Image: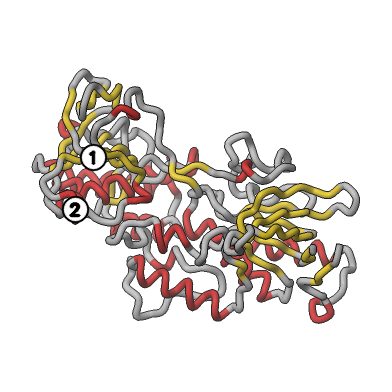
Amino acid sequence: MEIEVPVVIVGAGPAGLATSACLNKLSIPNLVLERDDCHASLWRKRTYDRLKLHLGKDFCSLPHMPFPSDFPTFVPRIHFLRYLDNYVSRFKISIRYNRNVESAHLDDRNGKWRIVVKDTASKEDAVEVYVAEFLVVACGENNEGYVPRVEGLEEFEGEYLHCSKYLNGRDMYGKSVLVVGCGNSGMEIAYDLSNWGANTSIVIRGPVHFFTKEMVFLGMTLLKYFKMERVDKLMMLMSKLKYGDMSKYGLVRPKDGPFLLKKKGGTTPTIDVGCVPLIRRGEIKVFSAISRIKEGKMVEFEDGKDGEFDIIIFATGYNSTVLNWLKDYEGLFNGNGMPKPGFPNHWKGENGLYCAGFSRRGLDGIAFDARRIADDIRMTTSARGLPDDTNFVGLKLLQK
C-alpha cells in the first residue's frame, strides 16, 4: 500500500511542527513523520532538567502563536513542552509516530518523492511508502549526539556520555566530572554539576563570548534599531564591566563581536547562568583541549596538564543524519548533511525539496524557514494550476 499526500515533513520537532502549522494555515494538506513516539522528543527526552530557552520568549515563538503572556521571559523546558503540545492541538497537526524513514528519493517516472518508512511500533516493522510532491526535511541539525574521537577513550575506566543523556547531577555528588565543551549546554551543565556537589571541571579550547541572558535579550532588541557593529561594541563592554578580565581563568574573548561571529559562521555566544562566577572562584576548574586518555581514569590535556576523572560529559554538539536516508540530496545538502546555501537562501532546494531548522539560528530561524517554505509551496501549487485547497484530496490510498 502506498500513501499519497501533497507534502511530507520528516521530523516532529519544532521545525516540523512550525512548517506543518504554516501549511495548515494555507489549507495545504501535509503529514509529519516522526521516528519517536512523541513530538519534540529532543526537548522531551534528551535535555537536562534545568534547561530554559536561552533567548527571551519574544524571539522564540513559532509562527502564528505567541507565548502566553503569563509565561516568564526565559521559558523553562516544561513550559515550552506545554506550549508545543498546545501548538499541535491548535493547528491540528497530523503526525504519524514511530515512523523511521529508511529512504527517500525522487521518482523519475512522475517527478515525486518516494519515501520508504518503517513502522517500528508494529510487530513486524511494517513498511509504508509515501508519495509526495514536496518533501520537507525537518529532522534538524541536532539529530544525533556527536562524541569526538579521543585517543584512549574506549579504554577509559570511568563513565562517559553525551550531554543529551544528562538530566541532572543528583547521582554525581562528590565525583570528579569533566565537561567537554563551553557552549550553552556545556557551561550550564557544569554549573548544574557544581550545584549538585560534583567536583567539576570544564574544557575550553578557544576564545568564547559570555553574557547574561538579559544582556543577549537587550542586544537582540537593539539590533532592530542600530547597526550590528554598535551593538557588538556595547555587548562586549557590558561583558567586561560585568565579569572583568577572565583570561587568567581560561576564558578569553574573541576579537570579533558576538553578533558578527554569529553572522559569519553560526557561532553562538555562550549565555552564562552562573558558571563564570564559579570559574572565577575556583569552584569550577578550566582545562585546555584533551590530548588523550591515559591509563585508568587519567586524562591528559594539550598543555601538558592531566587530571583524574570519574565521569566525562561531552557537550560537543550534534550531527545531522539526513544523508542516512535522503538519496537525492546534492542540490540542497553538502556531505555533512547541512544546507549548501547560506542563510537566508538555505531552506529551498530543487524538485520540491526543502529543509527547516538547519539555519543555526534557533527557534527564530525555524519560524523564518517554516513561513517561507509554506509560502513557496503555495505559490508553486498556484502557478501549476493545481486544484483549490478545498478540493485537494490528501492522504489518498493507492493500492499496488
Secondary element under disc 2, as helix, strand or loop, is: helix
- Left or right of 108 on screen, residue 372: left
Kindly identify the residue that appears in the image at 65 percent across and 45 percent down: 325
The quadrant of the image that shows the C terminus is: bottom right
Coordinates of residue 395 in the picture (x, y in percent): 76, 71
Badge 2 crowding class, 10 Å Cα cut-off, few under 14, some 14 to 19, many 20 or more, is few
Q: Answer yes or no: is residue 368 visible.
A: no
Image quadrant assignment for residue 225: bottom left
Is residue 35 found left or right of 395 in the rendered image?
A: left
Dot 1, how many residues are within 10 Å of its Cα: few (below 14), some (14-19), or many (20+)? Answer: many
Looking at the image, which residue is at 64% across and 70% down?
22
- Residue 211: where, in percent of width, then height? 28, 50
In the picture, which quadrant includes the N terminus?
bottom right
Looking at the rendered structure, which numbered label has been put on residue 166? Answer: none
Amino acid at the residue labelled 2: Asp
Q: Name which residue lies at 48% across and 59% down.
A: 363
Q: How many numbered tags mark residues here?
A: 2
Tell me if label 1 and label 2 are in contact, CB under 8 Å.
no
How far apart marks 1 and 2 lie (CA) works out to 11 Å
Disc 1 element = strand
Can you say whether 177 is above or below 88 in the image? above
Confirm whether residue 281 shows in the render.
Answer: yes
Mark 1 or mark 2, earlier in chain: 2
Q: Which residue is mark 2?
A: 171
Looking at the image, residue 62 sits to the left or right of residue 156; the answer is: right
- Type of amino acid under label 1: Ile
Query: Residue 270 location in percent, x, y?
Result: 32, 46
Q: Quadrant of residue 389?
A: bottom right
Relative depth, front residue between 226 and 167: 167
Horizontal and vertical percent position of residue 378: 76, 67
